Each structure stands twice: as C-alpha cells, then as structure tokens.
Amino acid sequence: MTAKPKQEQEYSIGRGLDVGTANLVAAKMTKDGNFEINPVRNAFLDIQEDSFTTKMLESQNIPFIKRDGKLYIVGESAFELANVFNKETRRPMKEGMISPTDADAMPMEVELLKQILGKPIEEGEPIYFSIPADPVDSRMNIVYHESIVSGILEKLGYNGKSINEGHAVVFAELANSEFSGVACSFGGGMVNVCVAFKSIPVISFATSKGGDWIDRQAAQVMNIAASKITAIKEKGIDLMSPNGPEQEAITIYYKHLIRYSLEKIIEKLATVDVPNFPNPVPIVVSGGTSMAKGFVDLFRLELNKKKNFPIAISEVRTAEDQLNATAKGCLIAALSGQ
C-alpha cells in the first residue's frame, strides 16, 4: 500500500489566507485540530544587480529573484537588508489592495505567496482569502484586486474563494456569542468592519484610513519621515499616556481613526434594518494597528461618547490573536465549506 505524502497525513484539506497590506498570513490546521500560522512581511527590496551583491546574497543564503537587471529580495530578508543598502522597502499592496500601477507588485506577491503556502495537498485545494469590503470613502477597485489574488492562487494549484476581512474575524472570534457582534479589523492599509447576526453579515464596509494613514498624518504635522513615526510605534507607545510630541501626534490620529470608524458604523447601520439582537453583543478588534497599548481603552472612551450607538454592546475586547485572526477566520470558512 502506497503511503500518503507527509503533508496530506498531517494537515486537513483547506487553507486560510489573510492578504494584508503589511503582512501576508497563511493558516492551515493539523489533523489534531491545531492552527498552524505562517506569516511573512508583504514587502520587497530591489537593488541593482552586480557580481559583488549577488555573491553576498548567495553567501548569506538569502533568496533573491533576478528581473530586468535588478535583484529582488522579498519578505523578512527585505526588511533586514533595507538598512544595509540605506533604502526603503516597497509594498506590493497599497491601501489594502494590490497596486495596479506598480509593474513589480504582482510578480513579487507571487513569490511571497509561494513562501508561505507551498504546494497544495491536492490539486484545487480550497483556500479562502480575505478581501476588503467596499470602502465608504474612496473609489478603490476591489474587483481588480480580488481577481488578481484569485488568479495567483489558481496558478499555485489552489481553488481560491474570497471572504470579507471583517466577516473572517467574526468566524474566528465570535463563537461564544453565537457569531453575533461587531468585528473591526484595523490593518495597515484599511479598517474593515462587519456587523453580524448569527454569522450572517448585517453590514460590511471598509475605510481607507488605517495604520499607514496614522503614520502619514503624524509625520506631516511633526515634519519628519513617516518611517520614523512607524519606528516610534513599533518600539511601543501607550495611547493612554503618550510621551513626547511625536507620541502625542500619533495618539491624536489614533483617536480620530477610532472615532471615524465608529461614526461610519452608526451611519451604515442607519441604512439597514438592524436585527433585534436578543442580548448585548461584543465588539472585537483585531489587526496590527490595534496592538498599541491602550487601544481598547481608547476605543471604549470613544464608544461611550456615542450615545446614539444603535446596538447594545456587552464588551469591547481584542481578538485572541490580533495579528492572525483574519487568517484563522478564513481557514475556518474553508474547512466548513462556507
């Protein structure tokens, strides 16, 4: 009897994929029911091709791609080498979607997805991938983005199906409330919101303001580079007790982002028949931008100011795994055949 491949023996069929501006996160489930997460920075670095640089990369076992006279390094290695070459990394995605104007975006995204997904267990293995909802404040082309990601996954041997990012967080985080509540995914490029009743979306929308927007706005008023604001955030900031003018500026724009998101939830709920939730429901926040210390406290303060919020809220809490909640929700959808 021929033994099954090791991968097929160890993992359930079905994958989840968070297609984020700052990070790509793949998820699969072991046969004993444990999540296995594989993230990568959604970024790349291009440098001029020459014999010295090529030998240096080879000696350090750093994978690279040759393309049109340049060398391309993707993922974590791109970040590590950016300082060496005194360059900024580039992102295949902008404001939540693959950049349609960057000729390098799609081939780099292919390489990154190869890194974290590998080969499917079987040809056409189902994979659910996150997409943003229709943004309320821009004319972004979600159809283009969804089609490009689906096409890449098909070339890699998968059968890709899209799911709204906020809806994926509902699957990952709201089981204890019968999948009813408000899921807010605060990413680098966008904020995605899904209000759900028993797993059925009541409203889903996105805004084009996210963590990158905070960085740009704070950098502008402080007259410094956005990368410096990013570094300040990554070193750690307490939004309830900012220290210094840069942190004060960051906190101001965090407050604005939370307030803006809450106002849009109220506006969107006013356009639909809101279900009669029998009990108060939770708000769960996820995404890298929500990981700043004091974020939930700030969120609660802003929510308490909204006396006209149309749903009774039981609690505001962070996702159990803020960075990976979307990928886990996508995987749950794939395994359940949603």
Image (cartoon, grey):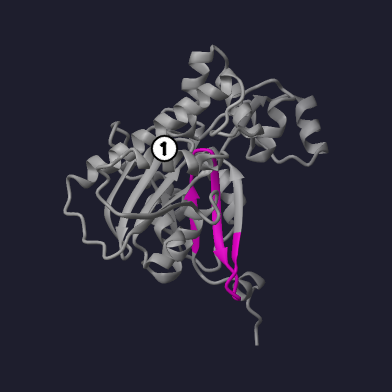
166 in relation to 94, above or below: below
Q: Position of residue 283 (x, y in %)?
A: 40, 52
Q: Quadrant of residue 55?
A: top right
Q: Which quadrant is the C terminus positioned in?
A: bottom left
Which residue is painted at 81% across and 38% down in the image? 60
Which residue is painted at 62% across and 76% down in the image? 9
The residue range painted magenta reads 15-36
Q: Position of residue 301 (x, y in %)?
A: 42, 39
Q: Which residue is mark 1?
A: 190
Q: Which quadrant is the N terminus positioned in?
A: bottom right
Q: Quadrant of residue 36?
A: bottom right
For residue 23: magenta? yes
For residue 216: magenta? no
Give the farthest residue toward the bottom: 1
Q: Quadrant of residue 278?
A: bottom left
How many C-alpha atoms fall within 10 Å of the one at disc 1: few (<14), some, or many (≥20)? Answer: many
118 or 130, nearer to the observer: 130
Does the magenta stretch mainly form a helix, a strand or a loop? Answer: strand
Which type of secondary structure does the marked residue at label 1 adopt? loop
158 in relation to 191, above or below: below
Residue 179 in sight from this viewpoint: yes
Which residue is painted at 54% across and 72% down in the image? 12
Q: Position of residue 268 (x, y in %)?
A: 23, 43
Q: Position of residue 7 (x, y in %)?
A: 63, 69
Give the farthest residue toward the right: 59
31 or 183, nearer to the observer: 183
Residue type of the residue flagged with mark 1: Met
- Taking the image as shown, residue 278 lies to the left or right of residue 26, namely left
